[in-house]
Every structure is written in structure tokens, then in C-alpha cells.
Amino acid sequence: MNQENEVLVQIQNLKKYFAVSSGMGINPAKKSIKAVDDVSFDIYFGETLGLVGESGCGKTTIGRLILQFYRATEGKIIFGDLDLTQLSEKEIRKLRPKMQMIFQDPYSSLNPRMKVGKIIDEPLMINTNLKKSDRTDRVRELLEIVGLNPYFENRFPHEFSGGQRQRVGIARALALHPDLIVCDEPISALDVSVQAQVVNLLRDLQDQFNLTYLFIAHDLSMVQHISQRVAVMYLGKLMELAQKDELFNNPMHPYTQALLSAVPVPDPKIERNRKRIILEGDIPSPANPPAGCRFNTRCPEVHDKCFIDEPVFKEINPAHYSACWLTD
């Protein structure tokens, strides 16, 4: 799927800390939420990179950092040959057409007071010099591309189902011919019956328009269906990154192994004999992460070194990266 591993986006030592106040009084103590803490990876042109992990691990924050909805605390985000962290707001606006987002909630991401034609037309009106008649033709074309009647342009969002609204969101993301689309859990708010339809639509659009996706999700079965590579996050850190088949068949990190053990297998014989890894306890606070390995409070394979030294995220097998002392 990728074009000889041509890199579209490089994430280098990316950090995002959110300052929060702790306690009451005139001078409350200041703490930092370490939402993303020293993360590095590449996104290849034309691929789908799945980004998975439990809620609160920093997946969505990474997507918003790439699109510059948030500014990074440290690190680099190189898009093409530009470091987005060094650009001004004006320069970022010029790049917006090349980077788009499909939001998690199709109900709140569409303006209820605007007709869907206007919603899809808005980025065209702001970022292009097309005449109104040409923009109308483009809007109708986009609606048809995502599987909706082009004359639905005069309807309001409340007249659509959740799956249809997400298709409108996809049409809006496609309007400016982007190179990269960040898909922020685009199916989690949809009925199970339409989730596969939306994922299949995204795959078809990728083939048709040579798109690159960062697909953020917690549904591992859907990530397996759409992704070429998969990255696993926990508490602001990358735990593992590998080709899809390699990661699902040979998970190296105990956290990845636990996640995959929770995915149902359709074969009842295999499912009965499969070992389920149950993680104890809750995820620690990102304002006060544990010393050493972030996963040490819940890891079934933990040993003394895990509480002292933080494992390095490094290549264990060809194109298979992990951050675990067990793989040394």
C-alpha cells in the first residue's frame, strides 16, 4: 500500500503536557498531565496506520497535535519537508487543505443549523476560488462518492442517521483533496450494523484517491481489517509498533498480548482453549505516572527492573518495535 516506504509524516520525540491546578487556595499547586510523552513514529504515504490503546492513553491527542489543533510541548512533526511545530498560525492555515480529520461523534461534529451541502461547501468556499456553481457540483459529487443521494444537500443533519452523518463528515474531509486524514474513532459512535460499511467505504476511498490514514480506535478487529501497520499506546507512551500481521500473530509487549487476548475469536473451539489475560487495577494518572515502565503497575510479567528503569522503544525484529525489558 505504501509507495516504497515514502514517509509522509515523521513524529520525533513528541510531547504534550497540559498544565492543571491541584488543590484550593490562592496559590494552588501546578501539575502537568503528560498526555503524550516522548513518542516517535512515521506514517508512510498511502498507508493506514492504526493507533490503539485504552481510553485516555493519548491517541486522540496525537491526532490533534499532527493537525496542529494543539501545539506540542516538545518534539517535531514533519509533514513533507516542513516542521509543523515551527510554523505560524497563518502558515498552518495554508496547509490545512492537505490535512483533514474525521471526528468521532457524527452528531456533534456537524452544525445542526446548516444544511449538509453548506457544511461540505464551507471548506471549498474558504480555501478555493471556485465559483458557486462549481462548488455546488463538487458538493454533489462528494455526496455521491460517499454513497449518499447528491440531492440530500438541502437536508439538515438531524434528518440523517448516524452512519449517514458520518458519511457527510467523510465528504467534508475529502473536499480539498487531502494527503492525510486523521480518523479519530470514526465508527465508535455508530451502530455495529453500519460500522463495517463505513470502514469499507474508507478503504475504497483510500484506493480511489491514494489517501493516507491515521486510524485511531480501540476496536482491534476493525483496526486489523483496515490497517497495514498498528501502533499500541499506553499512558502517553508507545508500547509496540509493527506490521499488522506481525503484531497480531507475534505480539511482544505484555500490554499488546493482553489487548489481543480480549478480542473474540469466531471459532468456538479456539475461543474455549484460548488464554485470557486479565489486567488488574486501573490505569495510573497521567499527572503522576509510575517510575520505570509505565505499564509496571498492571503488567503480569513485571520484575524489579521495570520499577527502576524505563525501557527503550527500539526495533526487536525487522520493522517490529517494542518498549519492554522482556525483549532485551
Image: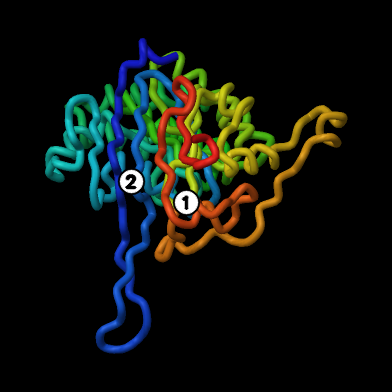
User: At which x and y percent is residue 77?
Assistant: 25, 37
Depth check: 122 or 8 in front?
A: 8
Identify the amino acid type marked 1: Cys
For mark 1, give the secondary structure: loop
> Contact, CB < 8 Å: mark 1 with mark 2?
no
Asked which colour scheme the image uses, the reply is rainbow
| Circle 2: residue type | Asp
x and y percentages locating residue 111 in the rendered image: 40, 49
Residue 119 sits above or below residue 308 on the image? above
Residue at position x 42%, y 21% in the image: 47
Q: Residue lying farthest top?
A: 4
Measured in 3D between alpha carbons, the distance from the residue under mark 1 to the one under mark 2, in whole angstroms, is 13 Å
- Provide the residue designation for mark 1: 293
Q: Which label's residue is closer to the chain start, 1 or 2? A: 2
Query: In this rendering, is residue 94 above or below 33?
Result: above
- Which residue is farthest bottom? 25
Q: Is residue 15 left or right of residue 83?
A: right
The residue singled out by tag 2 in the image is 38
The secondary element bearing badge 2 is classed as strand
x, y (%) of residue 278? 70, 50
